[in-house]
Every structure is written in C-alpha cells, then in structure tokens.
Amino acid sequence: MTPIAFTALFLAALGASLAVRIWLSRRQVAHVQAHRDAVPPAFVSRIGLAAHQKAADYTVAKQRLATINTLVDAAMLLLMTVGGGLSLVIGWTAAIPVPQLWQDVLLFAVTGILYGLVGLPFSWWQTFRIEERFGFNRMTWKLWLTDMAKGLAVSIALGLPLLVLVLWLMRTAGALWWLWAWSAWMAFQLLILVLYPTLIAPLFNKFTPLAEGPARERIEALLVRCGFARAGLFVMDGSKRSGHGNAYFTGFGRAKRIVFFDTLLTRLVPDEIEAVLAHELGHYKLKHVARRVAWSAALSLVVLVLLAWLAREPWFYAGLGIPDALLQVSMARPGVALELFLLALPVFTFALEPLSALYSRKHEFEADAYATRNADATALTQALVKLYEDNAATLTPDPLHSAFYDSHPPAAIRIAHIESLVRGSQALQPA
Ligand SMILES: [Zn+2]
C-alpha cells in the first residue's frame, strides 16, 4: 500500500463512521422527541407522564453532548495524525537525552495528557450540568477532583508498568513479541480482576456487608437454589456520587462478590432485588462472562498480530502523518507504532459495534429467561420499570440507534419478552 492510499482509507473510514454516528444521533433525538408526549401503551399503568418526559429530556441532553464529543474527538484525531500533532511530540521526545524506551513512555504521557485535557470539559458538563439538572448528581467539586486524582494515580500505578513491559517486549522479544505482549496483557487482565474488588474499588467507595434482614435471606436462598458458590454480599455507597441504582458482580472463583448500590436497595423490595440478582446470576451460570473473556482474549491476539504487521510497514506511519524526516526514528521506536495504532484503530473497529451490541442483547434475553425460571417474573418486570424510571432511561429509543449501540434490548421489547416467557410456562403447566 502507498502512504496516500492509506491516508485515503483512514479518512474515508473516519468520515463514514462520523457520518453514521451523527445520523444515528439525530434519529435518536428525533424519535425520542416525537414520542415525548405520550407514555408508550405497555407502560401507561406503570410510569407517569412527568417521568416519561424527564427521561426523554435527559436522553436528548446526553445525546447532544455525546455528539459534540464525537466531533471534538474526530478533530483531535485528525490534528494528532495527518495534522502532524503526534509528529511534534515524537520530534520533541526524540530530543530528550534518555533511552528510547523512556522517550516512548513520554510520548504516551504527553498524548495522554492532551486527550485528558480535551475530555475534561465533557466529563464536567456531564456531571455538573446534565446530571445536576436532572437531579442525579450528588458530587461536589471536591469529590470530582479527588476522584480524578485517584483515577490518575491508579492508571499510572497499573498502566505504567504494563506500558513499559509491552514496549520492552516489542523491542527485545523478537519476531514473536506479539505473543509475549498478549500473555502480558492477559496476565494484567487477571491481575485487575483480583485487584479491582479488593484494592481499587475501595479507593472510591465504601463497601459494607449486606445487613441481615428479609433481603439478605431472600438473596441467600436464591444463591443456594441456583447452585452458586458462596459469594460475598456487599452494599456500596453509590449515593455518594449519583442517584442512579445498579448491582454488579466482581471477582471470580472463590473471591466472587455481589455488590448492590445503596440506591438500588432503598428503591426495590426484597423480591425485586432477588429477581434482579437472578438475572445477574444468569449471566454467570449461562457462561456469558466466560464467553466475553474468551472473545476479548481472541480479539486482542488478532489486534496484536495486526499491530506487529503494521509496525513494519512504512506506509502505516507515513499514511498517518509522520513526515519522511521522522520516518526512520519513528520505525525504530515501537511506542510510535503502538500510539498511532491505538489512535487509529477505533475508526476501523466502529463498524463492528453493532455485532458486539447484538451479542450482548442476546445474552440479556437469556439472562432474563434464567431469572424468570429462578425468581418471580412479575417482580423482575416491576424492578426493571422502577430502574428505567429512576435512571430516566428512555422507553422509546430509535430502533436503529438501539440496534447499533445498545447492550440491552429496548424496554418495551425486553418486558414483552419476559411476559411472553411467563405465559409460555403457564401454558405448559397442567390445569
Ligand atoms: Zn444483564
């Protein structure tokens, strides 16, 4: 391939992904606004008009911010690549009298800071304008800044050793460096899985064991019924930051933990909590989690093989804005290939997003079916309706936007599916 052909391919992919993003975003806004004045028939008896309209306005506000963010990110990508931004940083770091490996680390640090600064106003606007306006935000300026400082410290503490290791392997491990880098990446993922619940998450939130009481009894009975190995049951002070409710699993093997946001526990009654948890257990029992891990392992191997190939091709560098004068020094520094690759890759993988979303929605349907077999289906729909309402999630997403991006099925389809399962199992029962 020639550099010009690769530049053309890159710009075409960026243009196409941008056009699709904006088109879908406009569809979403138009669809949500067109359905703002009436609660969908399936929800009329369960959600009030005011809550429905709040969800519509919240969805539109978030969508608009996301669109601006998309445009700014695209501009940033153009500036950094064909605009010569990365070349400037490469030239600047090449002049610093430290070994090339550390010049590469500096390249990542500077690029990371630039991207961080560009992302900051969006994060601020999301929290202090949008979340605030819709009554979800519980963050103060101080907490926001402390979170950021802690997040930065954690990413340096974990990310820096990984980066140095990968850059070192790219340099010294020979033609099969990508296999070593992949092993390092897998080990790192495993390490995060262990460290996240025990060390990282507690830096940001307080976790207390779930108190004795009706909810705990229901949950423990469910765990036994589903043949689930004993897991720690914890409550997280999610209300410290936001009014949104949630529940999740972390860890693996014997270190499994089930975490409930305090906001979820105050809002749902015990049989609804049980149904939500049964859904989450379904993801484990039906091997969704294991399958996701396997997929991501396979994909990261493919991605590394691709990088190993591209890093040897001059057109890859030249096509993404590295001038001839810097070509030799860039090809001698694996960090340059890695940074260019990480910047440009999402433009090409964007087209795969609907597949990943479809796969995820299939799992959601399966986990719902599991939940209806092991807990009360009516309680599950009640819990879902409450969560849609509390999180101001729209009940009327644009079908195409939803098909492209959404990891969960649209509310109406999801609830209709659960209700059809209940009718199906009733039909099977002897009269
Ligand atoms: Zn799920």
Image (tube, rainbow, N blue to C red):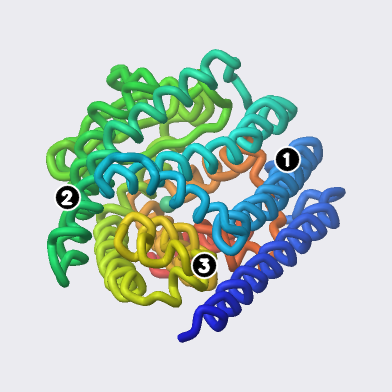
Q: Is residue 180 left or right of residue 71?
A: left
Residue positioned 65% across, 34% down in the render: 121
* 280 vs 217: above or below: below
Mark 1: C-beta under 8 Å from nearest atom of ligand 1: no
- Which residue bears the numbered disc 1? 58
Q: Earlier in the sequence, mark 2 or mark 3?
A: 2
- Residue 338's label in the rendered image is none
> Crowdedness of circle 2 by 10 Å Cα count: few (<14), some, many (20+)?
few
Q: Secondary structure at mark 2?
A: helix
Q: Is residue 88 above or below residue 413?
A: above
Asked whether, in this view, residue 178 is left or right of residue 323, the answer is left
Of callouts 3 and 1, the N-terminal one: 1
Check whether the beta carbons of the residues at disc 2 and disc 1 lie within 8 A of each other: no
* Residue 295 in view: no
Of 285 and 114, nearer the camera is 114
**Residue name at image x 50 percent, y 58 percent:** 407
- Which amino acid, by three-letter code, is at mark 3? Leu
Q: Which residue is mark 3?
A: 320
Left or right of 360 in this view: 384 = right
Q: Earlier in the sequence, mark 2 or mark 1?
A: 1
Secondary structure at badge 1 equals helix
Label 3 neighbour load within 10 Å: few <14, some 14-19, many 20+: many
**Where, by quadrant of the figure, is residue 372 drawn?**
bottom left
Relative vertical location of residue 121 with respect to residue 13 in this rendering, above or below: above
Query: Which residue is at the front of the view, 189 or 367?
Result: 189
Give the amino acid type for the residue marked by disc 2 in the picture: Ala
